[in-house]
Amino acid sequence: MIFFNWHIVNIFNVAFLTIAACALCACFKIPSENDENDKIEYVSVIVNQQGKVFSEPLKINANYSASLVAKVYPDVHKNNVKYFWYVNDYVIDSGNVYNISQDMMLSDFTRDSFIPDKIVVIDNEKNELQISFKAIVNFPPVISKNAIPNNGDTLYGNQNTPFEFSWESSDKNDVVENFLIIDSVTYSVGNLNSVKQSGFSPGVHTFNVIAKDSFGDIDSLKTRTFYIVSSLRGK
Amino acid sequence: MFITFLHKISLFAIAIIFVACGDSYLYDEDKNKENSNVEVAAYMLTSLDSADVKFKEFLIVPGDSIIFTSKVFPFKAISNNRYFWTIDGNDFANEYTFKNTVNEPGAHTVAFVFVDYFGDTLSDTLHLTVATPPLLDCTNFIPAIGTQNINPYEFMNFAWNAYEPDSMWNVNYKFYIAEFGATKHLIDTVLTQAHFTYIAGFKPLKKYEWSVNACNELGQCAKNILNGNFFVKGAVGENAIMVKFRTTDLSNAALYKLNIFVFDENDSVIVATFTNSSENITIGPLPNGNYKIKANVLDYNDFSFNDLLFELKGDVVLDLGEQTLVDSLAPIIISELLQDTLNVLDTLKFLVRDGGGKIVANKISVQLDNLSIIDFKYENDTLKVPLKDKILWSYKIITVSALDLSGNKSSKNFYLKPNSTLAEVSSD
C-alpha cells in the first residue's frame, strides 16, 4: 500500500516536473524567423521644409529653416531605436529629427559644421544601421518684380521698333541662367538681364522670365501682358 | 621462321597504318608558318567602290548607312574557326562585309574578331561616332530681323536658340557682326553660349548684319545659318535711307556711275550725290518728311528711273532695297550716209549705237539676202561690212541686227542698189 502511494506521488512529481519544464521552455527566447523580420531593415532621411517633404535629392532652400527627419523601416521600430546625427564622423545631435536653422546655412563653414552627413540608428540589441547622405543647401534664384515692361503697359511703335525687356535675377551662391519668354517663344538668354526685341504686331503680347540655377531651382515672374499700339511707320 | 614472317607482317601493317593516317600528326612547318602570319583588318566604307577611301574612324548621323568590311591576310579562305563583329562588346554581325546603320548617338567601338584554326583570336577595331548636328532656330532670335532705332552708343545683346538633339556634345557658335556691305567684320568670334553682348558701339544711321552658325564639337553644323540685321539710329529727328541701284544690263559686267537726287516736299533738291551701280548707298541724315528720289546713269541715257516716293518718320534708317534703272530702248542702226538705199562698195559702214551700254560684236548680226555675213568688224560704234559681190544687177537687202546689254533688239533693212544690168552680167 505504502509502495502504491509512493508510486502515485512519483507520478504527480513527474507530471509536475514536466509541466514546469514546459513552462520554462516557453519562457526561453529562441531565435525564430519572425525575430529576423523584426529587425530594422533600412533607414532613410528626408527633408521637411515649409510643410513640404523632399526625399532624394535632399534639397534645402537656404532661405527657410528646415528639418532632417530619419525614417526607419519597419515603421514600428521608430520609437524603439536611438538616432545619432554625424558631421564628419562626430556626433552632433540625437533624435529622429534634426532641425536646421537659417544661420546654419549662411556659409560654407556653417554648412560644413552643422548640417549632418550621416545618421546612425541603434536598436535595443545594439544592432546598428547607418547611412551617409548629402543635403544640398541652395539659395534658389530670385527674380525681382522690377521688370520691364510692366503688366498692362502700352507700347507705341511699329513692326521694327525695338522694345526693351529687362529684369533682375540673382542668386546668392550660384550662376543664374535666364529664359526669356515672349509670346510663348523661349529664348535662352544666359546671364543677360535685358534685350531689345522688335517684330511685334499691334495687339496683346505676353512676357515672362524664368531664372534657373545649376541645382535646377527656378524663380519666375508672373506672366505679364503688354499692348502694342502702331505708330510711326515709314513708308 | 613463322615468327619472323609474323614480325614482317606486323611491321608492314604498322607502316600501312601510318601511311593511311596521313601526315597530319607531323609538324608541318609550312602550314604553321602560314597560320602564324594571319592578320585581320577592318574598315568602314561609304560605298562598295573599290577606289573608295577606307576609314578606321568615321562620323555618321543616326540613320546613315555605312559598310563594314574586313580583310584576312593572306586570304579569307584560310582555315578558321569562326568570325564575327561586335559593337561596344555586343554582337553586331557574322559576315565579312555588311552594310548597317547605328542609331544610338555616341562614340562606338566596332570590332572584327577572327578566331583561326588554332583557336587564336585576332581582331581589329574601328571607331564609329554617331551624332546629330545641332538645330538652330533661324526664325526667332533677338534682335528680330529689321530692328530699327538701335542706340549707337549703348551695348547690345544678341540671343538665339539652338538645340543639341543628342544631349551629348558641346555646341559652339560662330558669330559675327558687320556693317552692311562691308567685307571686314566688327567682330568675328566663336562662342560657347547662345548669346553675346557687343559693347563697342556702332556708326549712326547704318545698317548692320549679324550671323550665327551652330556646330557641335564633332564639326557637324546646323543645316541653316541665322542671318539677322538691324539699323542704328542717329540723333533725334534724323533719318536715313539705304538704297542700291542696279540696271537692266544683263551682262553685269559694266559698272555705271549714277546721279542720285533727293527732293523734299517742295520739290527742292536737298541731296545730290553719286554712286556706282550695284553699290549700297546710305543717304542721311534726313529730317522727318516726304521725299522723292530720282536717279540716272551718267553717259547712258537709255536708262530711266521712275521717281520713288517715300516718307521718313521716327528716326529710322529706311531700307529702300534694290531699285532698277530700266533700259527699254533698242539700239540705233543707221548707214554712214543716213540712207536706207546704199551703193555697192567694198565695205559698207553703219553706225550701231546704244545708250544703255556698249554693244558687243557678238550681239550684232548681218545678213545679205538671208545669208549671214560673219567677217564684219565693229569698233567705236562703227560696223564695217565687206561685200564680196561687187557687181549687182538687182536690188539686194542687207539686214543689220543688234542686241543691247538690256536685251533690247533692233533690226534694220538696207537696200543695195544695182550697179549693173543682167545683160552685162550675162555677157561677162
Image (spheres, rainbow, N blue to C red):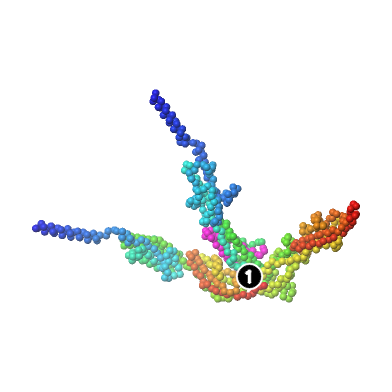
- How crowded pointer 1 is (Cα within 10 Å; few <14, some 14-19, many 20+) is rated as many
Name the residue located 51 percent from the left edge and 37 percent from the top edge: B30
In the image, B307: left or right of A161?
Answer: right
Mark 1 lies on a secondary structure that is strand
In the image, B324: left or right of B213?
Answer: right
Give the residues in magenta: B154-182
Q: Is A4 included in the stretch rendered in magenta?
A: no
The quarter in which the N terminus of chain B is drawn is top left
Name the residue located 71 percent from the left edge and 64 percent from the top edge: B278
> Residue A204 location in percent, x, y?
57, 74
> Residue B355 location in percent, x, y?
78, 64
Please say if B93 is above or below A175. Answer: above
Q: Is B162 included in the stretch rendered in magenta?
A: yes
> Residue B386 location in percent, x, y?
84, 55
| Farthest residue, direction top | B1
Of residues B347 and B262, the one drawn nearer to the viewer in this rendering? B347
> Which chain is home to disc 1?
B
Of residues A135 and B90, the one drawn nearer to the viewer in this rendering? B90
Q: Mark 1 points at which residue?
A: B148
**Which picture quadrant has residue A89?**
bottom left
**Which picture quadrant has residue A109?**
bottom left
Of residues A8 and B375, the one drawn nearer to the viewer in this rendering? B375
Name the residue located 66 percent from the left edge and 68 percent from the top edge: B206
Q: Can residue A227 be seen in this view?
A: yes
Mark 1 belongs to which amino acid? Gln
Please say if B199 is above or below A229. Answer: above
Please count the marks in the image.
Answer: 1
> Residue A180 location in percent, x, y?
54, 68
Q: Can residue B191 be seen in this view?
A: no
